[in-house]
Amino acid sequence: MENLIHQLKKHNSDLSLGIIEGILYLLKNEKNLTNNSLITLTGLSKETLKRFKQSISHLLQEPEGEEIILNKDGENLLSELDLQPYKWSLKDSFIFFSEPDYTEKIREIENIKNKYSPKPKREYDQFLSTPETSYLKSRILIEKNFVKGKSIAFLGDDDLNSLSLATLNTGYKNITVFDIDDKLLDSIEKCSKERGLRNISVVKYDARKELEQQYFGKFDIVVFDPPYTKSGVSIFLQRAIDLLGSVNNFDEKYVVMYYGNSFKSPEKILKIQEIINRFGFSIEDRIEKFARYSGAESIGNSSSLYILRANKFTKQIGRNFENIYTFEKVSEEKFPFVDHVVFKVFDVKKDFLISKGRLMSALEDVCKSHRLKVIEKIVTEFKGGGMTISFILSNSNLTVHTWPEHGALHIDLITCSPIYNKEGLFDTLQRLFNTQKIEVFFIE
């Protein structure tokens, strides 16, 4: 078995050994597998699974077909292997899958979706979740104690999760759905009326527009599954902050967000985490491939769950976006080139930091080593020995703040042309300030 899995790893370097074994386990044990069903089961992207099928083409009846069927060689080979299943998501461990009325609840949610879900609109990046996912999205709110006595806002609700939640639990204070789609809002109103679901209201709203003042700070929980773009996530987080209002340290106000992308693009995940950090939310929980959809094969028909807690540092970052949907062509932003790096330097001797001459000499050495032309030098001295030093450069500036009592200084270098040997700045500062304790931040 190890030989086969390691051999497949050579052709699928981005897949872990556990994932490869998990796919083989499904091929061995699942009946009537198709490309789409395998994508949904695994949460892997269409392109990833296409490449995997090519690597096992000698084990398949029709490697290029929609159905995935083992040939005789494949059946014989996998039957001899003790393959273990792979836990595609931590959600598979949730105990409420074993609830006695689980199947009945799924069926009820499925009936709601079949009767009331409008046809998904591509222009709004709508992809419908499975009934099981709608159940899970509601259960996670219940399990997190985000329902009882709470005012809940759904910022977009093409999956009808507001109706699923109200069907499973009636302990909420009120539910308000904000959505751009008239047909969707009509469906929610019709269903809630016909099924007697209490305190559900709808608001026609385009998240690209400013929110009406009457809704500011009126909600405890905001739930959304935004367009899977940086702009989409940013604008929905902005609106969530409006809906939650100001937050103190011990307030329990949360955002429940779903975001999907191929695991082959880790830079997109890092960018989303960076956006979340910029808004000042803390990531309390994250579950990979929590939700499942149909029609979103490029991201493996799946999205991850983020539980974001608001706090006193949560803030707007002050920008609205017009193009937020994946189909829209976003023209390149015409912002000048900026090379920006920040250093926090620790464990520097106090006598160094209170000496203007030594500091100036060290900073001049930095500029010389990295070809930064100095136009002007400005020094501001404070009581206690701290200083702020600014070097006006030919292509921007270098600013330094010192705290002698803490043995620390903060260096902010920004230029409008590439910094020469930027990677070597760390070594330069270590040498000049005689310390190994330096944190570096590269900023866009």
Image (cartoon, helix red, strand yellow):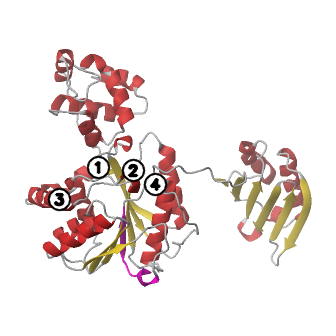
> Answer yes or no: do the residues labelled 1 and 2 have beta carbons within 8 Å?
yes
> Residue type at mark 4?
Tyr
For the residue carrying disc 2, how many other residues have a C-alpha within 10 Å: few (<14), some (14-19), or many (20+)? many
- Residue 2 highlighted magenta (yes or no): no
Check the image and name the residue furthest to the bottom: 214
Which residue is the site of mark 2?
Answer: 260
For the residue carrying disc 1, how many other residues have a C-alpha within 10 Å: few (<14), some (14-19), or many (20+)? many
Q: Position of residue 304 (x, y in %)?
A: 36, 53
For the residue carrying disc 3, how many other residues have a C-alpha within 10 Å: few (<14), some (14-19), or many (20+)? few
Circle 2 SS class: loop
Q: Is residue 322 above or below residue 240?
A: above
Q: Residue at x 81, y 68 (%)?
A: 388
Which residue is the site of mark 1?
Answer: 293
Which residue is the site of mark 4?
Answer: 325
The residues tagged by marks 3 and 1 sit, at their Cα atoms, a distance apart of: 21 Å
> Residue type at mark 3?
Phe
> Residue type at mark 2?
Gly
Which residue is the site of mark 3?
Answer: 96
Circle 1 SS class: loop
